[in-house]
Image (cartoon, grey):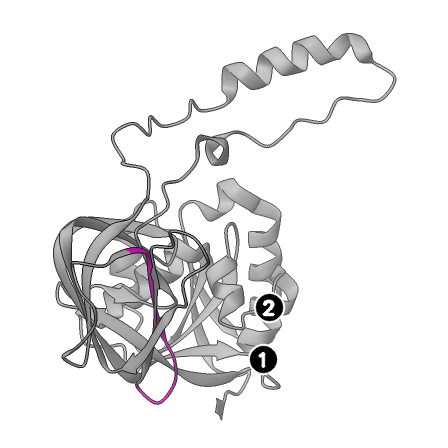
Amino acid sequence: MATFATSDQLLVIIDPAAPQTDGESVRIAKDVLSAGATTKVCLPDSPEEFARALGRRGSRRPVVVGDDRALVRAVTLLHRHRELAGCALSVVPVGGAALAESLGVPAGAVAAARAVLDGAERRLDLLVDDSDGVVLSTLGIPSVPVRAAAAAAEPVGVPSGRPWLRTTYRSLVRTLAPRPARLSAVPAPGPARLRVEVDGATVVDLDQPVEAVSVTPGSCGIAEVEVRPLSLGAEATPLLARGRTVTVIGSDFRYRADAQVSGPVRRRTWTVREAAWALTLPAHA
């Protein structure tokens, strides 16, 4: 892994949602980065401004302050402009960061910002599909719809010793909390009939219902594929395969990748791009 000097110039792009999610972590990240390097801070108001800021980075090393969606957005933009290979990304997670943490980014604004300053560039494989979309981690078929509970607001604490406030607090929470999205339009996941091909060889065909398919970019340009056939009694043994190209064919299937649901599609092919992008991680990772 290539290491960086703390004198590097940084372009700190703060995702529009980050200050609303956790303004204190954003402030801490800015303070730590500014203390250790020459920084230019951008506060875009929209995804379009986010894209323009990233495109105008010049020689500055981009640092994304935001959640997993912001990280995926940055990788996607660089890929579609064919600039991904020559640009090492850094991220300070603010908000949902399961993806970033699974890739090795430290949790917490201070630790993540220190990794930006003192860390090392690590090259990672990438899945690229035939619509020019990218997948950083595991993709799953069929997708699992987001449950209504996930849209609920976080519980509001009630001051101890004041039980008479509970009714007021609960009423306020019900008023301010966003209503759960209607899920009736998204079919519940279930057995699917899919043809899965790895490097042209059929792993499972349409005559065999499957419960799930997962594709993960491994290492050295090879994807790890797992197909779970439908179990009618004893648990079925997963079918495992490895290859550079994975094609899935079926009837209007959806897939979840990097916490986002895509589709429906009837055919999609993913190809592994070896060491296609770089992420700054702690030097000891």
| Left or right of 99 in this view: 191 | left
Closest to the observer, 266 or 47: 266
Image height of 103 relative to 142, above or below: below
Residue found 56% across the figure and 45% down from its top:
22
- Of the two numbered discs 2 and 1 on the same chain, state the one appearing first in sequence: 2
What segment is highlighted magenta in the picture? 210-221
The residue located at (83%, 14%) in the rendering is 162
Q: Is residue 218 magenta?
A: yes
- What numbered label is drawn on residue 282? 1
Query: Quadrant location of residue 145?
Result: top left
Q: What residue is shown with label 2? A: 106
Label 2: element kind: loop
Q: Residues within 10 Å of mark 2 (few under 14, many from 20)?
A: many
Q: Is residue 215 part of the magenta span, yes or no?
A: yes
Q: Residue furthest right?
A: 161
Q: Residues within 10 Å of mark 1 (few under 14, many from 20)?
A: many
Residue 260 image offset from top left, x and y in percent: 33, 51
The picture places residue 104, in percent across and down from the top left corner, at 54, 73
CA separation in Å, label 2 and label 1: 8 Å
Q: Quadrant of residue 59?
A: bottom left
In percent of width and height, residue 193 lies at 20, 54
User: Looking at the picture, does residue 233 appear above or below residue 64?
Assistant: above
Q: Nearer the viewer, residue 144 or 103?
A: 144
Q: Hey, what amino acid is under mark 1?
A: Pro
Pointers 2 and 1 in contact (C-beta within 8 Å): yes
Tell me the kind of residue under disc 2. Answer: Pro
98 left or right of 35 in image: left
